[in-house]
Image: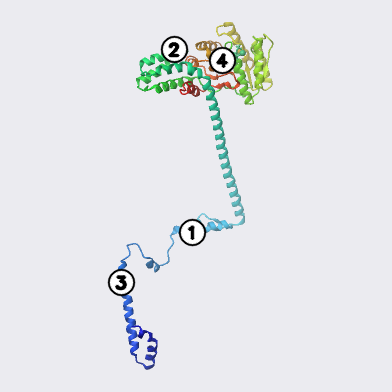
């Protein structure tokens, strides 16, 4: 079939020369026509077998025939912005408000550079200040955490006898297999009365238990403890008013310390001196207990340990004049704080209480506004007697705060609830041992937590 095709060039030339088509040329044209028809038929067949393209989808070969792709406005903007940025990065250009590259002169560039540097420095400052603040917060949190842990440990130790031998332990023993009902509450009431909590505190605690029982909230032992804890905290929070307020701005602040014999006044003063000296405050201690010669020596030992100054009078000198002299010195020599020790005295001895009133009056004469705090030191081992002391001292010389000492040596720690409910004088300090660090600020939350801590009981 392809023979006429091969001879096609010769047949074509021959036809040109002779003016007549040769048989070969005719055959070749027939073959070409036949091949063309076959090709068209094959194309038509393949198109049909693939079927039409789905609506909205153009085939690649179809698209190849379309006009070159048109960029959307958005794409064009992005491209322009990218170009502007590339130019700006190379220098001499900046990105205009419309996102296009704009030429800038050298001054603009310098200003831009300076602005960029300033912004980076400000950024850095903000970043490092934020980091520093964050670090400081972390440091403070760690410090508070450590102080908190130390405070808990000290208070836990200080209240261990009350927890193990006092009213908390005795209430614990009542539960053994018993139902929580009116009968059990009666037994709890008896324990509270016997435990130096006094009428007011006992009634307040019992009232809370009865209320919870009537609301059917005392479902188990833990709910009884929770109720006692919550009520105790509410009572103690009323007499908690933070640290002693003795700001140096009083030039100097004056603290007068009073209490019965042996309650822990001198020891508490030594511990306080140690604490405030650690805060770099200039402290003078007035040896206002001229009644016992040994009292001044004892105070001197504490002052040496704490590294603070002492103001001594003469033996048997009027205590008021010793305190006066100390405050004069304190004012003249720029002390931040003067602490006046006083001799222990029985709250029932009218003459001695009158002497204390005189000391207080003279202190006020020496320095307007002084004493800024009158701290009554109570020995927790005295139980209900401590409450009687506080009442009497309070009536005589307007006590502003209480330090409750020797909690570590007694099972009568619950007396603090009696003080809170009966007197309403703020408890600011608690003594939990004889060491310098055994004086803690009173924190009702920690106190209650450690008082009722069940695991350690
Ligand atoms: N365990 C314990 N002992 C304490 C605490 N506070 C004071 N003491 C001790 O109680 C005793 C009497 O303390 P002082 O500080 O001398 O008492 P004071 O009130 O100054 O006594 P007078 O000056 O005689 O009235 C000392 O043996 C102290 O060590 C305390 O918190 N815990
Ligand atoms: Mg003393």
Front residue of 131 and 392: 131
**Circle 2 residues within 10 Å: few <14, some 14–19, many ≥20:** some
- Residue under pointer 4: 376
Is residue 382 among what the camera can see?
A: yes
Q: Which numbered dot is residue 45?
A: 3
Quarter placement of the N terminus: bottom left
Residue located at (41% from left, 23% from top):
222
Please report whichever mark, 3 or 2, sits nearer to the chain's N-terminal start.
3
Alpha carbon distance from label 3 to label 2: 111 Å
Disc 4 crowd rating (10 Å Cα; few below 14, some 14-19, many 20+) is many
> Residue 194 location in percent, x, y?
45, 11
Residue behind label 2 places its C-beta within 8 angstroms of ligand 1: no
Label disc, if present, on residue 79 of the rendered structure: 1
Q: How is the image coloured?
A: rainbow
The label nearer to you, 4 versus 3, is 3
Q: Nearer the viewer, mark 1 or mark 2?
A: 2
Mark nearer the viewer, 4 or 2: 2
- Residue 99's place in the image compared with 206, above or below, is below
Q: Are marks 1 and 4 in contact (CB under 8 Å)?
A: no
Q: CA distance from mark 3 to mark 1?
A: 45 Å
Real-space Cα separation, disc 4 to disc 2, in angstroms: 25 Å
**In front: label 3 or label 1:** 3
Could you say whether the residue bearing mark 1 is in a helix, strand or loop?
helix
Q: Is residue 93 visible?
A: no
Residue at horizontal 44%, vertical 61%? 71
**Sequence-wise first label, 4 or 2:** 2
| Mark found first going from the N terminus, 4 or 3 | 3
Q: Earlier in the sequence, mark 1 or mark 2?
A: 1
Q: Which-is-in-front pick, marks 1 and 4?
A: 4
Q: Which residue was labeled with disc 2?
A: 193
In the image, residue 26 lies at what x, y percent? 33, 87
């Amino acid at each position: 079939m392809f023979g006429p095709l091969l001879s096609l060039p010769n047949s074509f030339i021959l036809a040109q020369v002779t003016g007549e088509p040769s048989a070969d040329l005719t055959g070749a044209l027939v073959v070409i026509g036949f091949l063309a028809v076959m090709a068209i038929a094959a194309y038509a067949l393949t198109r049909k077998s693939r079927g039409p393209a789905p609506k909205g989808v153009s085939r690649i070969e179809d698209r190849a025939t379309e006009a070159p792709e048109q960029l959307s406005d958005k794409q064009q903007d992005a491209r322009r912005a990218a170009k502007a940025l590339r130019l700006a990065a190379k220098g001499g250009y900046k990105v205009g408000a419309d996102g296009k590259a704009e030429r800038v002169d050298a001054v603009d560039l310098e200003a831009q550079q300076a602005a960029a540097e300033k912004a980076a420095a400000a950024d850095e400052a903000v970043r490092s200040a934020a980091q520093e603040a964050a670090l400081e917060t972390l440091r403070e949190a760690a410090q508070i955490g450590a102080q908190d842990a130390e405070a808990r440990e000290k208070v836990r130790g200080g209240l261990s006898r009350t927890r193990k031998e006092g009213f908390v332990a005795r209430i614990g023993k009542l539960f053994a297999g018993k139902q929580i009902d009116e009968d059990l509450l009666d037994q709890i009431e008896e324990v509270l009365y016997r435990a130096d909590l006094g009428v007011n505190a006992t009634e307040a605690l019992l009232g809370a238990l009865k209320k919870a029982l009537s609301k059917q909230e005392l479902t188990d032992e833990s709910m009884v403890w929770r109720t006692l804890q919550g009520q105790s905290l509410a009572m103690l929070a009323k007499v908690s008013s933070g640290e002693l307020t003795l700001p140096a701005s009083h030039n100097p602040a004056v603290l007068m310390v009073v209490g019965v014999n042996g309650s822990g006044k001198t020891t508490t003063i030594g511990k306080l001196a140690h604490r405030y000296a650690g805060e770099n405050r200039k402290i003078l201690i007035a040896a206002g207990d001229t009644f016992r010669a040994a009292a001044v020596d004892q105070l001197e030992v504490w002052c040496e340990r704490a590294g603070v100054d002492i103001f001594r009078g003469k033996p048997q000198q009027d205590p008021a004049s010793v305190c006066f002299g100390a405050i004069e010195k304190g004012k003249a020599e720029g002390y931040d704080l003067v602490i006046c020790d006083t001799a222990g005295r029985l709250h029932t001895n009218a003459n001695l209480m009158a002497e204390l009133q005189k000391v207080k009056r003279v202190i006020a004469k020496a320095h307007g506004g002084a004493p800024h705090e009158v701290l009554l030191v109570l020995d927790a081992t005295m139980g209900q007697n401590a409450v009687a002391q506080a009442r009497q001292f309070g009536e005589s010389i307007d006590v502003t705060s209480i330090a409750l000492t020797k909690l570590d040596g007694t099972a009568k720690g619950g007396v603090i609830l009696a003080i809170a409910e009966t007197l309403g004088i703020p408890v600011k300090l608690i003594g939990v041992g004889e060491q310098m660090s055994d004086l803690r600020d009173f924190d009702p939350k920690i106190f209650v937590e450690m008082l009722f801590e069940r695991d350690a009981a």
